[in-house]
């Protein structure tokens, strides 16, 4: 085994545009060599590994960062790859298998007892272990090849992600089974929510009563609807609130003019000119013109009246302000 | 300030598009609604313009259709289409317009497949129908969704 071969196999992932990150992990889920793999996903991956222990085959986890594909390399190692969320499951699995095929010829020594997690140098560490091992006992008998492992695709664990929920401005959220727990101080859920959303979560949840729509909630809090929607999806994943699930296969409305829910159509100003030329009074408004906020949301965020917003938008039409039409979920 | 031709027409059309998009649940349905709008005003156009006088009584060949398209363009927009392609595909005619009036200064994001200027498909389809030509017209590309030119496909039945 040479670290070069391993590096070559992994570099296939590194230069793949659809790969957001990867990690070569030990069988207990400790990251050994990682590249751009989000730290906060490790606990989740580790839990999944623990759950399946010996039975781990190819497994996928849907996360809000993207699609994670776990696959055992041999009895000691697990390869974990995070793909862009829009990648098809089948493609993600195929890509992972390609890399596994490259790794097949490489004999990986078991991980050392102690190592610094996710360190780049670990590749060399692995190298020296291999050299030592072969020096001591000549060529070891061929270890049982793990070729049965990656071939079977076991049923993916169904984990819900925020995108599985269909929340629009007219949705009326209801309280879910975890609603009261989430509002109980000192509960794990409450502190998780606090960390992720500060008091915003609490404020929104107080308004969830099965009667108010998302738009009404956002309006009465003077908050952008999108922010409320994001929070509600976060809550929906955890059973704090109940909202409709996205219907199967309807989540990609851009697919070649195909059918599917379009969401709400809005026009959002986008400034593509030179911010340096925007006068000081207008900068607060123009800065929000990122093609994602509607004029109404900008009015809310700046606490300025709508006529003022429209005047300002019109003023910058000649210096690079466009109105972008889009549908929002 | 962006230079816009016929701002009154444009504002009306934008209003209709917004309304249709807010009432439909998918792109295909929205495209069809815009074509329907075109069918409705196609009648008005046929009655109120010189299209009847300026075109042959019986439109039969693809060349006839192409000439009719030129007339419609001159009467509606006061210009010629950039291209009317009859060769590439049998049984259909493709119209290209680099400066389509309907989608001036419109930019849409993430709405692939939406034909912003489908209204013209409906208008043309109706005029062709009154001229005795069985054809289906639909927009292939729109500058509103990022294409270089707007194109329509006239599929002759």
Image (cartoon, helix red, strand yellow):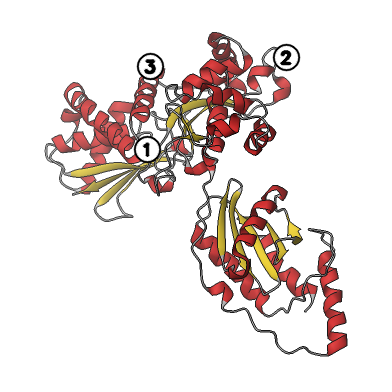
**Comparing marks 1 and 3, which lies closer to the viewer?**
1
* Residue A31 vertical position relative to residue A215 in the rendered view, above or below: below
Image quarter for residue B44?
top left
Please indicate whether residue B122 sits to the left or right of residue A248 in the image.
left
For the point 38% across and 29% down, the residue is B102
Q: Is residue A48 above or below residue B154?
A: below
Q: Using a 10 Å C-alpha cutoff, classify the residue at mark 1 as few (fewer than 14 neighbours), some (14 to 19) or many (20 or more).
A: many
Q: CA distance from mark 3 to mark 2?
A: 33 Å
Residue A201: name its quadrant: top right
Q: State how far apart marks 1 and 3 are (Cα).
A: 21 Å
For the residues bearing labels 3 and 2, Cβ distance under 8 angstroms: no
How many labels sit on residues? 3
- Residue B151 image position (x, y, % from top left): 37, 42
Frontmost residue, A12 versus B74: A12
- Within 10 Å of the Cα at label 2, are there few (<14), some (14-19), or many (20+) other Cα atoms? few
Q: Residues within 10 Å of mark 3 (few under 14, many from 20)?
A: few
The image shows residue A130 at horizontal and vertical percentages of 82, 78
- Please give the label number shown on residue A280: 2
Image coords of residue A173 (percent x, y): 46, 29
Q: Secondary structure at mark 1?
A: loop
Quadrant in which the N terminus of chain A is drawn: bottom right
């Amino acid at each position: 085994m040479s670290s070069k071969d391993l590096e070559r196999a992994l570099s296939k992932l590194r230069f793949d545009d659809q790969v957001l990150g990867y990690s070569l992990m030990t069988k207990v889920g400790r990251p050994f060599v990682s590249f751009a793999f989000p730290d906060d996903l490790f606990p989740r991956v580790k839990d999944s590994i623990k759950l399946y222990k010996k039975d781990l085959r190819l497994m996928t986890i849907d996360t809000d960062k993207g699609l994670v594909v776990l696959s055992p390399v041999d009895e000691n190692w697990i390869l974990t790859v995070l793909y862009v969320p829009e990648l098809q499951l089948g493609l993600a699995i195929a890509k992972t298998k390609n890399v596994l095929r490259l790794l097949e010829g490489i004999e990986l020594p078991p991980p050392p007892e102690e190592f610094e997690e996710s360190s780049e140098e670990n590749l060399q560490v692995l190298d020296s272990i291999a050299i030592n091992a072969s020096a001591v006992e000549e060529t070891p008998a061929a270890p049982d090849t793990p070729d049965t492992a990656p071939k079977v695709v076991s049923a993916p664990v169904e984990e819900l992600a925020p995108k599985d929920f269909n929340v629009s401005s007219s949705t009326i959220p209801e309280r879910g089974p975890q609603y009261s727990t989430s509002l109980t101080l000192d509960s794990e859920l409450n502190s998780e929510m606090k960390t992720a959303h500060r008091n915003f979560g609490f404020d929104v949840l107080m308004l969830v009563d099965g009667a108010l729509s998302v738009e009404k909630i956002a309006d009465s809090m003077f908050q952008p609807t999108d922010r409320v929607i994001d929070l509600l999806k976060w809550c929906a994943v955890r059973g704090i609130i109940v909202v409709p699930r996205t219907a199967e296969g309807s989540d990609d409305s851009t697919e070649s003019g195909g059918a599917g829910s379009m969401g709400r159509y809005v026009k959002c100003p986008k400034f593509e000119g030179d911010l340096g030329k925007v006068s000081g009074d207008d900068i607060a408004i123009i800065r929000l013109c990122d093609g994602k906020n509607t004029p109404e949301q900008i009015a809310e965020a700046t606490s300025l009246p709508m006529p003022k917003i429209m005047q300002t938008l019109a003023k910058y039409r000649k210096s690079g302000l466009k109105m972008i039409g889009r549908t929002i979920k | 300030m962006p230079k816009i031709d016929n701002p009154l027409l444009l504002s009306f059309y934008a209003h209709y598009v917004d309304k249709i998009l807010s009432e439909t649940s998918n792109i295909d349905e929205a495209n069809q609604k815009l074509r329907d709008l075109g069918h409705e005003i196609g009648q008005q156009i046929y009655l109120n313009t010189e299209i009847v006088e300026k075109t042959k009584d019986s439109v039969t060949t693809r060349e006839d259709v192409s000439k009719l398209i030129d007339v419609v363009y001159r009467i509606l927009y006061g210009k010629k289409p950039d291209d009317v392609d009859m060769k590439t595909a049998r049984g259909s005619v493709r119209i290209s317009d680099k400066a389509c009036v309907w989608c001036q200064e419109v930019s849409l994001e993430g709405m692939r497949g939406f034909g912003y200027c489908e209204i013209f498909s409906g208008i043309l389809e109706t005029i062709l129908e009154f001229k005795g030509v069985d054809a289906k017209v639909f927009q292939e590309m729109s500058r509103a969704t990022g294409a270089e030119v707007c194109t329509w496909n006239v599929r002759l039945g």
